[in-house]
Amino acid sequence: MTFDYTASAATAQRLIEKFGAQAVLSRVEHGDYDPATGVASVSELRYLVTAVVLDYRAREIDGTVVQVGDRRVLMTADVEPATGDLIEFGGATLRAVAVETLAPAGVPVLYTVQTRGL
């Protein structure tokens, strides 16, 4: 018998929506280089997401991988974040420095993003 992870994903989404808040995830994408103009096209993509922003515990801060001021962002599995993305939440802009995907059996349940203030 296999476990239905889509139900777990729905539960995670429901909890993040209940206890989280709206945030904006933005990403800059570079298009093809145009040799005639010498320029590559650039576009900014913006997604409305639901997230919970948490501080790291003191014992998790090692000063190298996790630095003072880093925040942990839990996001629903609607939009997959990437390293370098910006997350605007509660008046602060945070840059994603690491992304972990909880996806048992290949079904995305939630994303955990380590962020750092700009």
Image (cartoon, rainbow, N blue to C red):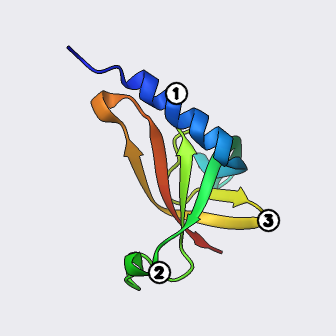
- Left or right relative to 73: residue 8: left
Q: Which residue lies at the image location 65% right of the left edge and 57% below the top edge?
A: 87
Q: Amino acid at mark 2?
A: Gln
At which x and y percent is residue 34? 62, 46
Q: Quadrant of residue 49?
A: top right
Q: Where's residue 115, x and y in %?
A: 54, 66
Residue type (three-letter) at the residue carrying disc 3: Gly
Give residue 31's quadrant in the image.
top right
For marks 2 and 3, give the CA distance.
21 Å
What type is the residue that disc 1 sits on? Ala
Image height of 41 relative to 114, above or below: above
The local crowd at label 1, few if under 14, some if 14 to 19, many if 20 or more residues have their Cα within 10 Å, is some
Label 3 sits on residue:
91
Residue at image mark 1 = 10
> Residue 26: x, y in percent?
67, 51
Residue bearing mark 2: 67
The tag earlier along the polypeptide, 2 or 1, is 1
Residue plotted at (51% across, 36% down)? 12
